[in-house]
Amino acid sequence: MNKIKTDFLVVGSGFYGSVIAERIASILKKKVLILEKRNHIGGNCYSEYDKSTNIEYHKYGSHIFHTSNKKVWDYINSFTKFNSYKHQVLTNFKNKIYQMPINLETINSFFNKNLSPHEAEKYINKISKKYYKNKYDNFEEKALSQIGLELYSAFIKNYTEKQWNTNPKNLPASIFNRLPLRFNYNEDYFKNCIWQGIPKDGYTKIFKGLIDNKNIRLEKETYNLNKDYKVKYMTIYTGPLDRLFNYKLGKLKWRSLLFKKKIVNVNDYQGTSVINFPEKKFRFTRIHEPKHLHPERKFKNDKTLIIYEYPKTSDDEPYYPVNDEKNRLRHRQYKKMAYKIPKFEIGGRLADYAYYDMDMTISAALQKFESIKKNI
């Protein structure tokens, strides 16, 4: 392995690494070596088939592609076509199903009212007014100021505690920005995005297409900073920075997920792809039923696959960065160390210690490639 020479070395085969590798191989016609420590390509977007039901599922949780970035949309559509799936999330509270994010149907159903959009907005403003502040110091303060105590206690507080394993008062207010509030009946979770859907042939086929190039070679190996890989131009690293430096400054804290599959002998278990379970009596936070991600496909009528999602703390399979002040500072210190390495670039959600949607990752990779192209 250490005798192999390459023009570019890419560490990680998720969207960031695979897109950059594809662009370098296709446009610059340079040799790219991709190192992947997992036994599959695609990072956390990897999909595979359940042998018992022949249902394709996303191994690391349901991934719904959504974007309003035309450049990203055009690029990804050169490797796949998308179905017509529109994402809807429901939540089960006290054995009753509600819409999430909170919309007019949620408000009317929860409070047993029949409010118009204008009336609902006035009502929510009334019950949340006493929590208004000029500056919100934490997640709970921001949430209460937007939806009031009752909706927060039912749908948000316990779910957040389970997800992050901490009191919401210890989380930054900015996290609540990902939870929109609507005063209409729109049930489309990503209604502000122009395009959304699930790849018709699954995510894994996208990655196979991205790296299917004579100039790209894939090797299963964990990257070692101290190893000489004979790289002519540049190494592009997409993994966690603390792991890169063998945790020299300490570990960055991540929240992770554990998924437990179950085959159920019914045609349809819950009627939708994802249902949240905010109550603490449930250890899991969500149940996924992946067959609903592909309404265009035909499945056997006698069984279905469901997947329970359990939050946990782990840096083995990092999902969500715990972006408190201590960890942000540590990450900045690791970045400074990475910037000192010659012919070395970092990028992607793990290296950036950030939560990125798939389109954001692809966009960042395309921008990084343009920078590389100018300097080669």
Image (cartoon, helix red, strand yellow):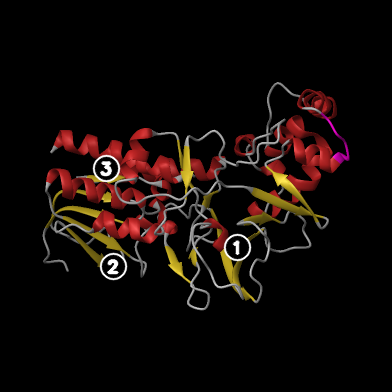
Q: Position of residue 104 (x, y in %)?
A: 75, 35
Return the x and y of residue 69 as percentages of the image width and height. 40, 34
Q: Earlier in the sequence, mark 1 or mark 3?
A: 1
Q: Nearer the viewer, mark 1 or mark 3?
A: 1
Instruction: Look at the picture and state if 107 lies above or below 308.
Output: above
The numbered disc on residue 340 is: 3
- Quadrant containing the C terminus is top left
- Secondary structure beneath disc 1? loop
Regarding residue 245, the answer to whether it shows in the image is no
- Name the front one of labels 1 and 2: 1
Q: Which mark is residue 289?
A: 1
Tell me the magenta residue range.
111-115
Marks 1 and 3, Cα distance to the nearest angstrom? 46 Å
| Left or right: 179, with 206 as reference point | right
Task: Please say whether residue 113 is one of the residues in the magenta stretch.
Answer: yes
Q: Position of residue 51 (x, y in %)?
A: 48, 77
Q: Residue 22 lies in magenta, yes or no? A: no
**Which of these two is toward me, 288 or 132?**
288
Q: CA distance from mark 1 to mark 2?
A: 33 Å
